[in-house]
Amino acid sequence: MSATATPPAARPRAPQDTPPAGRSRPRRQTGRHLFLGGISLLWLVPLLWAMYTSLRPYEDTAKNGYLSWPSGLSLDNFTDAWAQSGLAHFFWNSVLVTVPAVLGTLFFSAAVAFYVSRFDFRWNIALLMLFTAGNLLPAQVLITPLYRLYLQWNLPGWMSDSFLLYNSYWGIIVIHIAYQCGFCTFVLSNYMKTIPKEITEAALVDGAPVWRQFFQIVLPLCRPAFAALATLESIWIYNDFFWPLVLIETGDKRPVTSALASLEGQYFTNPNLIAAGALMTAIPTLIVYFALQRQFISGLTIGAGK
Amino acid sequence: MTSTLEAPEEPATTPAAPPVPARRRRPRRLGLRDRLFLGVIVGVPLLALLIFVWLPALASFALSFTSWDGLSLSEIDWIGWANYREIFTNYPPFWPAVQHNVIWLLFTALLPTPFGIFLAYQLDRKIRFTRIYQTAIFLPMVLSLAVVGLIWEIIYNPDNGLLNGIIGAASPGTHIDWLGDPDLNLWAVLVASAWRHTGYIMILYLAGLKGFDPALKEAAALDGANGRQTFLRVVFPALKPVNIVILVVTAMESLRAFDIVYVLGGGIGSKPGMELLSLLITDNIVGETSHIGYGSAIAVIMLLVSLTAICTFLVQNFRKDKEEA
């Protein structure tokens, strides 16, 4: 970590000769490449270490220590971790929560954004602020009353075998939608403001009902924003740890991210298995990130940077 | 919720906000079905937001003045400021938690945040491999904090972790228990959190820099400013909106830090040396020690602190809207 503290002092030498030329004609940038390459490598070390640990058989590391040359690499830890803990089941739980939560968030935030950006009423800004601020509240501020509310809230048996909002996927999906709508509404309303008013006005003059404006004109035009937000929200919701930790009783109903905490110690008993379990949990997000990096980053930055 | 249903009609008769009507005038005759449609698609998320987010936030506030075992609603007793008095004077983990949250904020604001900005500035030019560098440094941000916690647990493991292995502290007797020692564990967690935070800030700042007019930089260079001067005197002040976002992000992340501490603390709630306000709240939700009044009072303290950050963010973003309107 000390490495992060030192470079700023050493920096000024290199940039001096570069900024003006950097734009037009790249010069020798060896120093900068060494620095950035070094930092990138340093940043990858924890992940590479986890990969290395996960690929080594436990017997090997037990005998030779973890910081040693491997006598053989295999995927056994992955298959063991997968089979012993029943990870497939927890992944399925994650799907059951993430897919409806992302779709619901996008749909409803698009609706609010549509309303706020296309119809001007006195409380538009107030409404938008209410949603945005809600997303910024720390989850822990809500959790105590929310937990009690979930324990009081009855659901029919076909929705939840606990007959409560507590310990049901519905509860997790609903809180995700309510909480994440703030961010998406904020982003989408900014995006919709850039759609020329004339488009929907023309539709209105033609007598198209509002629902057709929404579904057939505005939503298709927002496709790029949806792509970015869907990527971002899928990762966020999949990665969420807190809501199911409190709102789903320990057991086999938790999504994989929250289940990790209890699987560790129960099934993942040595670092090799922990590494394998952690990496498998990370695989879906890594795939999405590498495949849709641009969407992910633009989702993050249109919200924050504008 | 009925207010949203009726909303469309009212402003039509009384032109609303003075600066708006001229530009945004449009034929507005929404039929019953249009209003119903809007009412439903806006009313549902609004109801969800109010019931599941704002109601609990307000309820935290109310419950912080009560004593309640959480079982039956009739058992709620109003006890005024007693919870706060107890927390401030008679709840040992409270002040350490406040201290740790402050350390968290200062550490994050002073190391990973400026470093992320610095990296962004270095990467915002035409150099080769810039995408590779960005991908690598931003990668931790894609992992869930639970996974990040496990990955660092393997590094910090006192017996067979990478860190002790490298510095030669793995053999018995020289053990450094990074996550167990109350003087060390907070810093160990902060390093793990910085690993993630740096890339986040870098990406946010890079987006800001993309919108920065390069001509200003060139002008500064022509005037003989060196790299550091250009950044500190020209670029940084011009990116005020991004700076505020980053400030808010840093403050909020420091305040709501939870997952990573929970996982690295062994999943049992707060641990000596790693108490945080967020963990004290969950300590008090369930179990025999549950003390809902305490948890709520701490939640209110968190709420008040976060509201300053939230307001900064809202003012920053919505002032612009008003100017545009």
Image (spheres, rainbow, N blue to C red):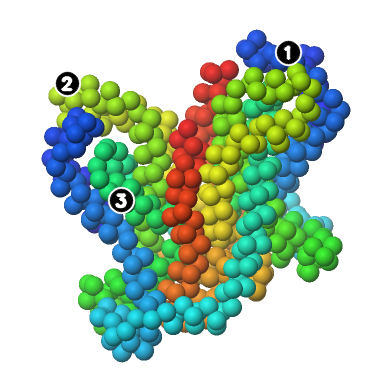
Nearest to the observer: residue A193 or residue B270 = A193
Q: Amino acid at mark 2?
A: Asp
- Pick whichever of labels 3 and 1 is earlier in the sequence: 1
Dividing the picture into quadrants, the one containing residue A159 is: bottom right
Name the residue at 20% across, 49% down.
A33
Residue assigned mark 3: B133
Residue B270's x, y, as percent? 50, 65
Asked whether, in this view, residue A171 is left or right of residue B37, the answer is left
- Pick whichever of labels 2 and 1 is earlier in the sequence: 1
Name the residue at 51% across, 38% down.
A303
Nearest to the observer: residue B45 or residue A245 = B45
> In this picture, is B250 found above or below A173?
above
Please tell me whether mark 2 sits on a helix, a strand or a loop.
loop
Residue assigned mark 2: B223
Residue assigned mark 1: B15
Farthest top residue in view: B22
Q: Residues within 10 Å of mark 1 (few under 14, many from 20)?
A: some
Please tell me whether mark 1 sits on a helix, a strand or a loop.
loop
Q: Amino acid at mark 1?
A: Pro
Label 3, label 1: how far apart the Cα atoms are:
53 Å
Q: Tags 2 and 1 in contact by the CB under 8 Å rule?
A: no
